[in-house]
Structure formats: structure tokens, C-alpha cells
Amino acid sequence: MANVQFENLFKNYGDVKAVHDFNLKIDEGEFIVLVGPSGCGKSTTLRMIAGLEDITSGLIYIDEKVINKIHPKNRDIAMVFQNYALYPHLSVKDNISFGLRAQKIPRAEVEKRVVEASETLGLEGLLSRRPGELSGGQKQRVAMGRAIVRNPKVFLFDEPLSNLDAKLRHKMRAEMKKLHKKVGTTTIYVTHDQIEAMTLADRIVIMKDGLIEQVGTPDEVYRRPNNIFVASFIGSPAMNFIEGEVSKVSKASSMIMLEDKKSIKLKSNNFYNNQNIILGLRPEDITVTSQNSGKNDNIIGLDAEISVIEPMGHETVVICDSNYGELTGKVESNSKLKENMAVKLNVSLEKVYLFDKKSEKNLNL
């Protein structure tokens, strides 16, 4: 295991800043997930750690030692790629042991490590097969086995589950979590899938346009997003947003005017008059009902009409048209709601996120 640190890391491709002022400390044994949309710089960052991309400026440390100029094979890391990168003409056993044999490690030690890795990953009965005879999940386990046998200081994973179907991805996530708990190696994992990030990570690093937007535990980035981007990226379905303007601020409260002139009273004076704000409503915090719940100063009630119903088995996602654009809520799977039905969307004021429209920062923090 090792600690990893990034200090003012930059990567430019001509005038394009792929990674910009990246600073992060990773503790020994920590499972860190870099997540963000395509082109945000997460895979570029991973490849700089591996030595597959040159660093424009900045420093990367492993165990307090700068590795910028160290050859990739001497960095004591192991990387698992998206496309598995297995040798099709070699058996599973030979694929797993290839790196060890290249290092001239004694045969007995190679055999021992291969057996231990195959038992850990459930590959004992597949060692004589070739990659073409394996399923996608089995190929992924072989690629992981090849990394495990090296006993590296750091594991790097570059979207390793993206080629698998949904059921197999779920299974492999669980296996990877068990594996990390058992092996304990410091792990840096790249994905664009926020569900993978939430389920696997000790801490999540959310990136956009080469910059770190927020670093935190899954619970922190979900419940206390720094800005609108993080709030919209973490959570499924995505958070709803409604524009409003602060119309009046008193000593104890503020009045917010929504786009259709509906007013909301907040028990806070952390605003200024005429400030443009964005209200964020998570679908899971919205109660969708066909009946008017009556006046309640602690509840925002929005009129809407159901346009689409998406049954998910354990729950139902309800997409509605409203004066504030499209809004999404969740209801129980046995709900009697139907498309084209007029409904009321209710959400507690305590569950409402508030963002400054200009800076996009979370005003609740």
C-alpha cells in the first residue's frame, strides 16, 4: 500500500487544458474514484500516474517520492484497462503470470501468486482456457488477476466495467469491493458512471473540464454538493432545478418569487434583494399526489401534469410538465397515478437546495 499525492498537476494538449491545477492527497489503502463526463480529464490523470502521458507541469508523489521521471515499469503500479488487454494466444494462467515471468521471478513464486489470485477471483477452473473462451466478466477478472499478482503499491482502473451488461456490472462492483477489502491496496478508479462511483468509493473526486469540482465521501457529495454541476451529476434521476428571485429580505426570513410569480417564504436572511437563485429539488424528496394537501408554510406545492410514467419495479419515476419546465419525481410502484393526470408536487422546504444563479455555488453550505 502507498499514499499518493498530486501537486498543481497540469496537462495541456496545445491550447487545450485537459487537466488544470489538480491537487489531491490519497491515503494508504483508500479507494478513490475519479468521476465526471467524457472529456473531463479523469482518464488523462490516471494515465499520467501510470507514466503513459507526459506531465505538462506539477508533481505526482507515491510514498512521498516524486515519480514524474520514473519509468512506468519502475513505478510499482498495476493498471487494468477498459478493453482488458489480454493476450489472445495465451491461457488464463499465462496471461495472469506474464508480468511476473517478464520480471524473471522464480517459477515457484509465480505459481504461488497465480494460485492465490485465481482463488481470490474464482478463476481456478479457467486457468487452461484462452480469452476467446471466456465471458466478459471472466475476462475482466483475468485482467484484475494479472494486476493482483504483482502486489503493487497502487491499483489503477480505467473504466473496467463499461463493456459489461448491467447485471454483470452489478456483480463485478460487489466483487471489486470485496477484493479491495481483502487486499487493501490503494486504488484509483476512473468511471463516468455515478452509480459505480457512489457504490465503490471511500471518496469521490468529481471533475469537469479538467478541474476538480468537489472531493468527498459518497454521502457528502450527495447531501452537500458544492455547486449545481455536482448536484446535477450525483443522483439518479438528476436533480430538478427551478429559477427564482429574492423579492424581499427581512431579519428572520426571505421571500422568493418563482418564474410564475408564485412566492415562497424561507426562514433565512442569507440573501440580498433581487438576487437570482436556483432551487434544487431531488426527485426522491418530491411527493406526487393527485390531491391538494392544503396550505402548509413548510411545504412547496407545485402544480403539474404527468407526461411520462416509468415503472422501475421497486419504484416508479414520474416525469411531469409544469410552469417551471420538466420536473421528475418518484412514487411507490403500486401508485395509481396515470399519464395526463393533473398532480401536485410537494417538497419540504428543509429538502430544498439553494444555489446562486451567477456563481452556481450552493448557498446552503
Image (cartoon, rainbow, N blue to C red):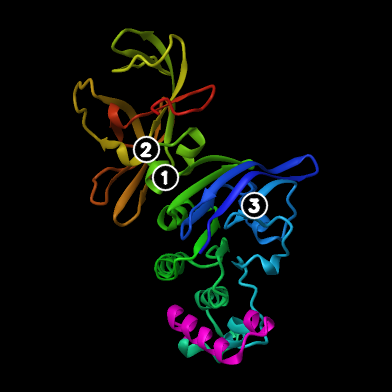
Mark 2 is on which residue type? Arg
Q: Which residue is mark 2?
A: 282
Q: Secondary structure at mark 3?
A: strand
Mark 3 or 2: in front is 3
The answer to whether any part of residue 131 appears in the image is: no
Q: Which residue is mark 3?
A: 60
- Mark 2 is surrounded, within 10 Å at the Cα level, by few (under 14), some (14 to 19) or many (20 or more) other residues, namely many
- Segment tinted magenta in the rendering: 98-123
Residue situated furthest left in the rendering: 294
Residue situated furthest right in the rendering: 14
Residue depicted at 43% across the width and 9% down the height: 273
Residue depicted at 48% across the width and 49% down the height: 204
Q: Which residue is mark 1?
A: 235
Is residue 146 found inside the magenta-colored segment of the image?
Answer: no
Q: Quadrant of residue 251?
A: top left
Up/down of 63 relative to 106, above or below? above
Mark 3 is on which residue type? Ile
Mark 1 and mark 2 residues within 8 Å of each other at the beta carbon = yes
